[in-house]
Structures are given as C-alpha cells and as structure tokens.
Image (cartoon, coloured by chain):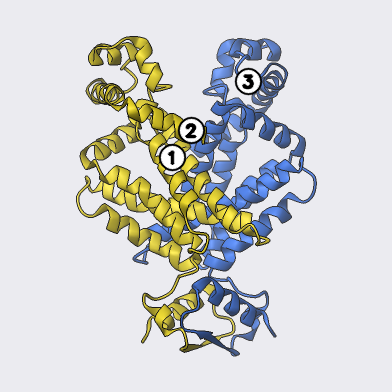
Chain colours: A yellow, B blue
C-alpha cells in the first residue's frame, strides 16, 4: 500500500523521471548497459547525480520505469474486483494490465526486450519484477480461495500458470518485433489457463443453456487430459 | 552439456569446494551475508583468495553450492526418460530431484531458507536458479509435445505449475523447520498438477478397468473446474 502511494508521488514528478529514464535507455543502447555509469546518465539528462537516485534505486530500475506503477495498478484492480466474479478471470485481467503497458509502446518494449536478453543483470532484475506480479496475483487468489483446503496451493499454481501463459504470449509478440496484435497473442495463451482452472471454463454462450444436460461417456482408464478435451468439445457442441 | 561436465569436474574437487562453502555459510550466519567478504571466507577456510573464485563465481553461489550439480542431475534424468512415459509424470519426478537435495540436509536447508529470506541479493539469486530449473523442465515438455500446435505454450505453463507446486510443498516443509516428511508435502502439491495436466491423471488402478465405461451427466453451463471434479470422482468410484 505504501508502495502504491510512492508510485503516485513519483508519477506527479513524471517529466524529470521520464527524462532520466530516456537518457539512461539511450545510453544503454549506444554504449551498452555495463559501460554506462550513473554519471553518464545525469550528464546526458542535464541534472545532478542525486536526482537519479531520487527516482531510481539502481541503473536496472531505469530500464523498467513503469513496473512500479503497473504493479500499483494491478493491486488496485484486484482490490476493486467483485468477490462474485470468476477469480481466474480476474487474475487473467490483472495480467493484461502488464501486457497493455508493453503494448502501449511497441518500439521501446522491443528494444528493451533485446537489451534485457543481452544483459544478465537485467534478466535477473526482470525475474524479480515478474515474481512480484506473480505474488500479487497469488495473494488475490489465496484470499478468494481461503475457504478451500488446497486454496493456498491452488493460488500459487494458478498464478504461476497465468504468468507463464502471459509471458509466452508477450514474448511471441516481442520476438516478432512488436508486429501484430499483442492482446490477441496473450488472450490465446491465457485461454489455456482459463479453460483448465477457471470457474467459467466453458463454451461462450453456454451459460444461456443452463437447463441443458451434457452426457459424456469415457472409457474408465481414459487419461484426465483427454477426458477434459472431450468434456470441452461436448460443452462447445450445440 | 558443457555445464554438466564442469559440474562433474568440480565434484571431483569436492572437499575444497565443500570447505569453502561451509566456511562461507558459517560466516554468513555469524556476521550476516553483506558484511562477510571473500577475504573473510578464504581466511576461515585457510586458502588463497583465488581458490574461492575457482569454485564459486560469487558470494551468492557459495550459498547454493549444490544447485549446479542438481541441474545437471535433472538434465541427465530428463535426457534418459522414456518417450512413452507420461511427460508430466517425468517432469514431476525431475522436480523431486531438487526436493531430495533439500531433504538430504534438513538443518542446512532450513538455515539457508531463513538466511535467504533476509538477504534480497540471495532471494534474487534463488529466483534465477528456480528459473533455470523451470526452463529445463519446459524444454523437456516442449520436446515431448513438439507435435501439438499449443505444445510450446503448454510446456511453459505446465513447467511453471510444476515448479510452483514443488516450491509450495518445499516451503511448507522449510517453514515447519524441516520437521515432517518433505517428500509427502511435495507429492501432495504435485498431485494437483498431475491431476490437471498429466496423461495419467486418473484414479490409481483405473488403468486396469480399461474396458469399463464412465457416464457423466453435467448441466451444460457447469464450470469446467466442477466438471473435472465430477469426472475425477466418477473415475475414482468403483
């Protein structure tokens, strides 16, 4: 919560923060991340050294200037979610907030993706950011599933699955150079998780047929994965 | 592969490596991680400074001396796995190799868990190790599911789910102070993933009833999660 407030605070000062982030990023691309010093960055931005650290704890943070506010947006979104809604749908929508941050600036996102792949320190930094998103989503699911005996376990597994699916879709889009529809790539990936774990993992429009009944017949030794595929196609068939 | 060879190499020199890791860990516990220098460690171990870096790239690596060989063991295990086996079972068994490394030395594992929670740099390091396990498992699944259109996506989602479940079980055991049965905690957690994703996600012994048939009736609007629960209980019922 105090984090969210901090972010709101730094948002007001956005221009200087953006100037610094942009100067840092340009230098990282020109000279490489390792060879760029904070002194280089503040010189390029035309400010004092302490200004940098007022906005960014480290050189790494300046590469991902929007993750803090994105985490705050995700937290606010989850806090505001209706307790009657499908919990898995809510975390999928929460993950889409991250996607939209990337999609809002394709060129920057693609350049940063390439830079991050080359710099181990940035990859590690990114892992810790991804982990924070995952914990935020897991925390929400744990709260929603607090009555279930395996709720905490399920929360962690589903949050990890959502993040993995989101990142798979996001990465395809980044690898394609930011061409195509980022949201569609992520929707498709998240769909796999929603089908398996969501309360509403059913055919679109199926809710209307509430009174109808599906009869499924399966050999007793059938693997669960195939049984699910059959149930799905049965629910989809009209 | 070259990694595996390196590990085998350093294993032969294990005594010195172990002496260094133990000296480092004792100092981290006594003085704190940040305040311990490599000079302190080599002084305690009674060797030269360069010996440390021959075995460990960084202070962080000395806290997790067994992960490299564990990764090599996991890779070898996956390489040797039968292509006819259930791919999800194989990665669950692969994850259990990590668990057994922790369970082999409960006192050290619990102390390290507590230390890691207090030192941000160690948490980040651990994240990158966990990510390497996840990528190793995902790589295996991708290979096994290379014929499926969504194989690569499914591989990443299932690997993330397996790692999350494994870590949930491992963490319960570590939080309990290493009391109780670590393998049972992890088995229970992995079971959730096996039921959802495994080819053999079926009741024990169900394979024997190959000729039998299960008929399941569900309202058309039923959520997938509940449908699966019903299918499961139907498959379990004799």
- Residue, disc 2: A3
Q: Position of residue A38 (x, y in %)?
A: 34, 14
Looking at marks 1 and 2 on the same chain, the residue that comes earlier in the sequence is marked by: 2
Q: Tag 3's secondary structure?
A: loop
- Whether residues under marks 3 and 2 lie with C-beta atoms below 8 angstroms apart, the answer is no
- Whether residues under marks 1 and 2 lie with C-beta atoms below 8 angstroms apart, the answer is yes
B83, above or below B106, in the image: below
Disc 3: CA contacts within 10 A as few (<14), some (14-19) or many (>=20) = many
- Residue, disc 1: A72
Can you tell which quarter of the image residue A153 is in? bottom right
Residue B109 seen from this side: yes
Q: Position of residue A61 (x, y in %)?
A: 39, 27
The answer to whether A114 appears left or right of B101 in the picture is left
Q: Tag 1's secondary structure?
A: helix
CA distance for labels 1 and 3: 31 Å
CA distance for labels 1 and 2: 7 Å
Q: Position of residue B97 (x, y in %)?
A: 63, 48
Q: Do badges 1 and 3 share one subunit? A: no
A103, above or below B86, in the image: above
Q: Residue at x 69, y 32 (%)?
A: B114
Disc 2: CA contacts within 10 A as few (<14), some (14-19) or many (>=20) = few
Q: Chain for mark 3?
A: B
User: A46 or A110: nearer the eye?
Assistant: A46
């Amino acid at each position: 919560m105090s984090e969210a407030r901090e972010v709101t605070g730094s948002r007001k000062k956005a221009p200087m923060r953006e100037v610094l982030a942009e100067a840092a990023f340009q230098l990282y691309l020109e000279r490489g991340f390792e060879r760029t010093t904070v002194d280089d960055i503040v010189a390029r931005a035309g400010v004092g050294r302490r200004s940098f650290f007022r906005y960014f704890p480290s050189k790494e943070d300046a590469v991902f200037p929007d993750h803090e506010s994105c985490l705050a947006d995700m937290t606010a979104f989850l806090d505001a979610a209706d307790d009657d809604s499908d919990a898995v749908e809510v975390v999928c929508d929460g993950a889409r907030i991250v996607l939209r941050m990337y999609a809002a600036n394709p060129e920057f996102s693609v350049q940063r993706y390439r830079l991050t792949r080359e710099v181990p320190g940035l990859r590690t930094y990114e892992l810790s950011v991804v982990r924070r998103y995952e914990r935020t989503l897991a925390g929400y699911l744990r709260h929603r599933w607090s009555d279930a005996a395996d709720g905490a376990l399920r929360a962690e597994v589903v949050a990890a699955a959502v993040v993995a699916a989101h990142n798979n879709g996001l990465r395809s889009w980044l690898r394609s150079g930011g061409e195509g529809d980022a949201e569609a790539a992520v929707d498709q990936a998240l769909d796999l998780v929603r089908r398996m774990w969501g309360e509403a993992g059913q055919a679109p429009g199926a809710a209307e047929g509430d009174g109808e009944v599906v009869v499924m017949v399966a050999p007793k030794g059938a693997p669960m994965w195939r049984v699910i595929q059959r149930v799905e196609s049965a629910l989809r068939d009209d």
